[in-house]
Image (spheres, coloured by chain):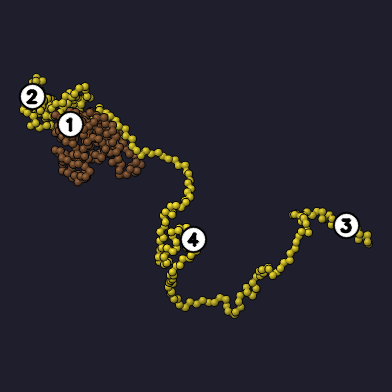
Chain colours: A yellow, B brown
Amino acid sequence: MFRSIKNWTSDFIQTIKKEIAGVKIQGKAVEDFSATRFYSLDFAEVPVLSPPLPEEMAPVNDGLPRELPLEIRSLTEQNATLTIESAAFTPDPLLAESASVQHPEVTLAHVPAFQPDNVCIIPLAVEQLRSLAIQESTVFFAPSFSEWSLFFRIPIKESSALIYRFPIRRTPSPKSLYSAEDIRNAVSYILERLQTVPHLELVGIYRDVPINRIRQLSFEKGKLLFTLLPPKRGRDVILDVLIVREPAEGKYHIGPIVRKA
Amino acid sequence: MADVNAVLAYLSVIKERDDKYIGGILATDGYGIPLEFKYSEPLKPTGLQKILYGNSIEKFLVVDTIGKRLLLNLQEKPRIILAGDIRLLELQTKFSMVHLIPKTSETQQQQGDIDSHAFSDDEMGAFRVISHSPLTADEFQLLEKVSREMDVMEPFSRLKEALQYVCSDQ
């Protein structure tokens, strides 16, 4: 019997050893158990948080029903009026001091007694504000600029030929400005160049016509229109002219008038 | 006869219907015969320029831009410049410049529009002579003489025709 107990004991020990060998301990091993200190806990320092007593959580058993029937017998309208009481403002010395540090010229002593219906306007010290350091941060974009010219570029051209295209207009001068001899000389100048003596009509007498540069003559409502050739060397020959018309042929004839000063 | 050596210059800036501005200066002798003609290329202000210049764009173009450039480019030395627009009298130039207004019933109404403090207002025959500073006696005499010889305003019509031709050609 002792032998069987001995065998069972040894078998039990072997079994225990095998089990212990299979166990893996996770975590740090305690290096020195002897360093572990134990403190005694003083319960008097520990706040005790306890749930409310069951009797406090339970409804009050006062014999009254929990839900009372509400009966509205009459409604009375009441106006709610807001009353604002005003009080004199006494500046806090500490606050006043701190305010005077920021803006020395503005202290709460300058502020009048506060009235709710008053708006207190405190003049800002502009010079002080200007001296404030302002942090600027500039964000750079990359805009695409379109270049527009605000100024006008005016090329100037010259063209005498262009202005010669447009006729110079002369209005007829009154015959009273000329003597009968001047007119007779002009008419005889025309007749000398005509082989016949036709019937002639006076168109008009025109002043200051450059007879050596005329390219084309025309008439418009009694006005003489003439265009010019480009200027030649030498001076222009400018004369007054008497112009007559031959009705049968529709021709115009020109006779110069040399004015006597 | 008028003084052959007398040179007048006719300065005018016109605005065509399509907002084109063009100006010209025509120098003539005492008979109205052309001696020199210069003109600006037609100019049409852009929309942005119209916005930026606002109401002053017309005066700026007529006086400060076109009129000034034309005077600077003139080679002849006119004794008197006749301005087609009274605003051109504001041009700073060494020449005497006048604006002639025919004395008709219509132009009499313009009398109130002319600032008598800024301009000198004289009479010469059928014209009122408006200028910044009064003409000298010689200049006034010359102008009178020319106006007796010819229609002193006639070169303006040629100038206008020429400018309109340039505008329509481009």
Structural distance between the alpha carbons of marks 2 and 4: 114 Å
Q: Chain of mark 4?
A: A
Disc 2: which residue: A185
Q: Amino acid at mark 3?
A: Asp
Q: Residues within 10 Å of mark 2 (few under 14, many from 20)?
A: some
- Quick one: SS at disc 3? helix
Disc 1: which residue: A169
Disc 3: which residue: A11
Report the residue at 21% width, 22% height from top.
Answer: A233
Disc 4: which residue: A98
Q: Amino acid at mark 4?
A: Ser
Disc number lying in front (2 or 4): 4
Observer able to see residue B3:
yes
Observer able to see residue B143:
no
B117 in relation to A166, above or below: below
Structural distance between the alpha carbons of marks 4 and 1: 92 Å
Report the residue at 17% width, 34% height from top.
Answer: B138
Structural distance between the alpha carbons of marks 1 and 3: 151 Å
Residue A236 x %, y %: 18, 24
